[in-house]
Image (tube, grey):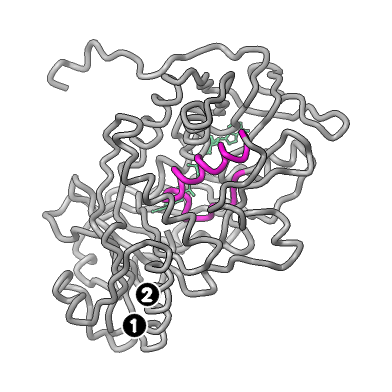
Amino acid sequence: ALTGHKGWGPVWRDPAPKSEYDYIIVGGGGHGLATAYYLAKQFRQARIAVLEKSYLGSGNVGRNTTIIRSNYLLPGNEPFYEFSLKLWEGLEQDFNYNAMVSQRGIVNLIHTDAARDAATRRGNAMILNGADAVLLDREGVRAMYPWLNFDDARFPIKGGLLQKRGGTVRHDAVAWGYARGADLAGVDLIQNCEVTGMRIENGRILGVETSRGYIGAKKVGVAVAGSSGRVMAHAGMRLPIESHVLQAFVSEGLKPLIDGVITFGAGHFYVSQSDKGGLVFGGDIDGYNSYAQRGNLPVIEDVAEGGMALMPAIGRARLLRAWGGIMDMSMDGSPIIDKTPIEGLYFNGGWCYGGFKATPASGWCFAHLLATDTPHPTATAYRFDRFLKGAMIDEKGQGAQPN
Ligand code: FAD
């Protein structure tokens, strides 16, 4: 701003689409951009394009509440999310961009004895997979956040599961960092280019129809988050995914109050504080299916009630902004990174409301699958056929926290 915003050069090129690529990635969100970046940089592939219907980062990657963590329980999940957290830890050096990765710690609150048992089990599973976890008693939580509502008649706070390496990352910067890195590695980032159809012959994909004309490809990877159902319908596929809106909220700027991330263990509410001072918080998805990128009042009320139960002081803060993003809710709450029955067509989605933290590993594992036709060792469970076999990865059923 001191230079009057003059002399800024574009950070990536604005190429016209070529007639054919080896790889087309549909969706210029975090996962699509990370996939293209690792395909080019890690797996040394070339002739790659990312097709984005709007501008890069216009979807959930720029709408989430920025939380990263690897505090999962199930064998299908924990190694993957821990891989992701390790990639976050080296990401800024890797793509040479300040993404404000801030390992400020995340604490999941415990309100019952049964929840303490579940948290202990989850913490042990995390440690067994190389992650970090600390079980806090009530006084341990009080030492961190003395103003929480410890003696609520319904949900007294009895402790917490702390992951110190969890935290927050500046979400837009993640999109920009991956975009610049991919562009420097030769990837064509094509904005305002909506995929409107797929050309499939004899069970093989030949390319995609777009708002900027037909583009051929040897392999097509779809990573469109909340639009998964609509895009895969172009290939005649019906997914085990529903789209719902998730809202986020930011209060007016306050003096430093929360230096980590807190999640309520008895309701759907979580909160952190941005570097600008705003309390960043959220809760449950809107109840019905929607492709709208804005939410509705009943959930705002529900989130506010959760916030008041946990930290009554929040009632004094004014709400500054609220927005929504479209979530690709899978039937077991876990993602899919897999080939499809159509040769050359690959799918990445079903991230629900927790896919931001997965961005680096999702991109890496999807690039691995696209380049080698084999799943990455940490993503072998994320297959379509688990719904056929009934081998669900029901992390939420195990009491994990949202986001
Ligand atoms: P997106 O950024 O949505 O990328 C998909 C892209 O595909 C979009 O840019 C879209 O325009 C494009 N697209 C769609 N259709 C087409 C088409 N036909 N042709 C071309 N392009 C197309 N996760 C966490 O881990 N931690 C959190 O704290 C967290 N909080 C959240 C809070 C909110 C309010 C929301 C909405 C989400 C939150 N999430 C969180 C979830 C996380 O943001 C998503 O799971 C993740 O960002 C999805 O992957 P993405 O970044 O690739 O999606």
Decide whether the magenta segment is chiefly helix, strand or loop: helix
Segment tinted magenta in the rendering: 348-371
The residue singled out by tag 1 in the image is: 111
Q: What's the residue type where badge 2 is placed?
A: Gly
User: Which circle marks residue 265 in the picture?
Assistant: 2
Please give left or right for residue 57 compared with residue 337 in the image.
left
Q: Is residue 362 magenta?
A: yes
Seen at 17% across and 70% down, the residue is: 145
Q: What's the residue type where badge 1 is placed?
A: His
Residue 344 coordinates in the image, percent (x, y): 73, 33
Please give left or right for residue 375 compared with residue 281 in the image.
right
The quadrant of the rendering that contains the C terminus is bottom left
What element does badge 2 sit on? loop
Residue 169 lies in quadrant: top left
- 305 vs 215: above or below: below
The quadrant of the rendering that contains the N terminus is top left
- 48 vs 324: above or below: above
Front residue of 122 and 55: 122
Residue 115 lies in quadrant: bottom left
Residue 305 coordinates in the image, percent (x, y): 35, 71
Seen at 59% across and 18% down, the residue is: 47
